[in-house]
Amino acid sequence: MSEAAPRRGRPRDAGRDQALLGATLAILAESGYGGLTTAAVAARAGVSTATLYRRWSSKDDLVIAAAAAYHETLDTQPDTGSLEGDLRAVLRAKAATLTGEGGRLMQALIGEAAQNTALAEALTDAFLTPVHRRVEEAVRRAVDRGEIPPVEDIELLGDVVAGPVMSRFLLTPRRPDQVDAVTAERTADRLLPFILRAVGGGGA
């Protein structure tokens, strides 16, 4: 008689994962990195701390996973068919990310990332690398369409987009969660002509 196949453990509950990541983001936005504890996250998510630690072994691992999950909800941008339309979409998306509760979250994470290399790398992957990729893709499409001449140092263009938006919303006395969605979008649109001129696209 052949041996019985070993029993597998219960599959991981994706719903609990999402509850824990959502609770992490909520507490970060409310209390900052220093005010976040794994016990508070577990309580907010309605699970035990043992359940949390079976998934993430430390507070840092949990925060990095939450940042990555948040990024996944923001990572798609359409091809609008024009450089102006593509850059407007990127700017508006970045402005939305850095205002409201998302802006409070970013402030909390950036403050901690100055002292936490792993978190800094995770934030770069989750929030900055996608902007660089989208801008580079938009500019390459514009070059291929003949809208603009080839651009040198194309890998730096993401900073040209992200820098002004971050400065506008994260480096001022006004808290990012005090900026409403309409103001964020209008600010992005006001920045657009300067970004277009920087890549050779003219004014808007």
Image: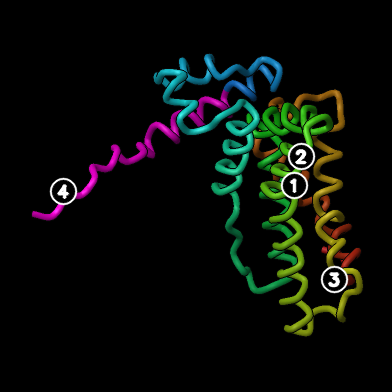
Image quadrant holding the C terminus, namely bottom right
Residue at position x 69%, y 20% in the image: 32
Q: Which residues are magenta?
A: 1-26
As drawn, is 58 to the left or to the right of 161? left
As drawn, is 79 to the left or to the right of 145? left
Q: Amino acid at mark 4?
A: Ala
Q: Establish if 11 lies above or below 196.
A: above
- Which of the two discs, 1 and 3, labels the residue nearer the N terminus? 1
- Which of the two discs, 1 and 4, labels the residue nearer the N terminus? 4
Asked if disc 2 and disc 3 are in contact, CB closer than 8 Å, the reply is no
Asked if disc 2 and disc 1 are in contact, CB closer than 8 Å, the reply is yes
Q: Amino acid at mark 3?
A: Gly
Mark 1 vs mark 3: in front:
1
Residue that numbered label 2 is attached to: 120
Mark 1 vs mark 4: in front:
4
Q: Is residue 2 magenta?
A: yes
Question: What is the C-alpha distance between the residues marked 4 and 2?
Answer: 47 Å
Asked if disc 1 and disc 3 are in contact, CB closer than 8 Å, the reply is no
Question: What is the C-alpha distance between the residues marked 3 and 4?
Answer: 68 Å
- Which of the two discs, 4 and 2, labels the residue nearer the N terminus? 4
**Residue sitting farthest toward the left:** 1
Mark 4 vs mark 2: in front:
4
- Residue 16 rendering spot, x and y as whole percentages: 39, 31
Q: Secondary structure at mark 1?
A: helix
Residue that numbered label 4 is attached to: 4
> Camera-side residue: 101 or 29?
29
